[in-house]
Image (cartoon, rainbow, N blue to C red):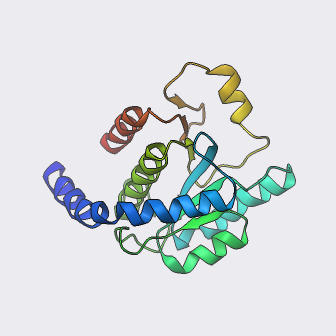
Amino acid sequence: ANVNGRKLMGKKMVKFLPGIPSLEEEVRAKLVQRDLQPGADVVVMVLNAGEIDVLANFVCSMAKYHISMANVMVFAASEDIVPIIESMGAMGIYHNDSFAHAPRNASGEYLDRTFIDMMWYKSFSVWLLLKMKYNVLFQDIDLVWFRSPFTYFRKTHDDYSYTKSSFTDSLMSYMLPGQAKAAQAAAEQQELR
């Protein structure tokens, strides 16, 4: 399994690496359009078409509790869902030149093929924003908010490098630029599970 996984990762990297400069420009343009400069907090999620309804739950929680969507960036597994993401108030990103194929349907179970493909999106989206010097709050798409967690992270964890929330089924991670190694280690740990 590890040999096949490494081969698949190699195929994804061959497509991803040459497109990093143009992907970074596309992401930067979206962030600057919302007046988000390096050092700003950005919420990052990944999504395929089969999970649009779950994103809607998150958006509804943000609206109910009057939390801004201005710093929410969703990396889409297909181009056709970007307008839907953006109509909900988030920044939608799809980069045909760099993104590896991912299935359109939601994952059927933990660690199925769709789940593994979406893990790729989780890893590179966090890495890219950390590389660009943004603070990243990565969360799974199936979380909802009752209040902004940024005050908690700043107040409670002034000197941390990686924080895993107390959620039992979902991951929420807040990382600062320079913590890319911690993000990489976390992604590798998640992959081993």
Of the pair 154 and 32, the residue shown nearer to us: 32
Of the pair 56 and 35, the residue shown nearer to us: 35
Of the pair 138 and 132, the residue shown nearer to us: 132
Q: Does residue 44 appear left or right of residue 187 in this picture?
A: right
Q: Is residue 91 above or below residue 173?
A: below
**Residue drawn 33% across the image and 45% down it:** 191
Of the pair 129 and 7, the residue shown nearer to us: 129
Q: Is residue 137 above or below residue 124?
A: above
Question: Residue 78, position in %: x, y?
Answer: 48, 75
Question: Residue 123, position in %: x, y?
Answer: 40, 49
| Residue at the far bottom in the pictured view | 80
Q: Does residue 63 appear left or right of residue 31 in this picture?
A: right
**Residue drawn 28% across the image and 60% down it:** 17
Q: Does residue 184 appear left or right of residue 64 in this picture?
A: left
Which quadrant of the figure has residue 149? Answer: top right
The C terminus - image quarter = top left
Question: Residue 33, position in %: x, y?
Answer: 66, 62
| Label tally | 0
**Residue drawn 74% across the image and 46% down it:** 145
Question: Residue 23, position in %: x, y?
Answer: 43, 64
Which quadrant of the figure has residue 95? Answer: bottom left
**Residue drawn 62% across the image and 53% down it:** 142
Q: Is residue 185 above or below residue 81?
A: above
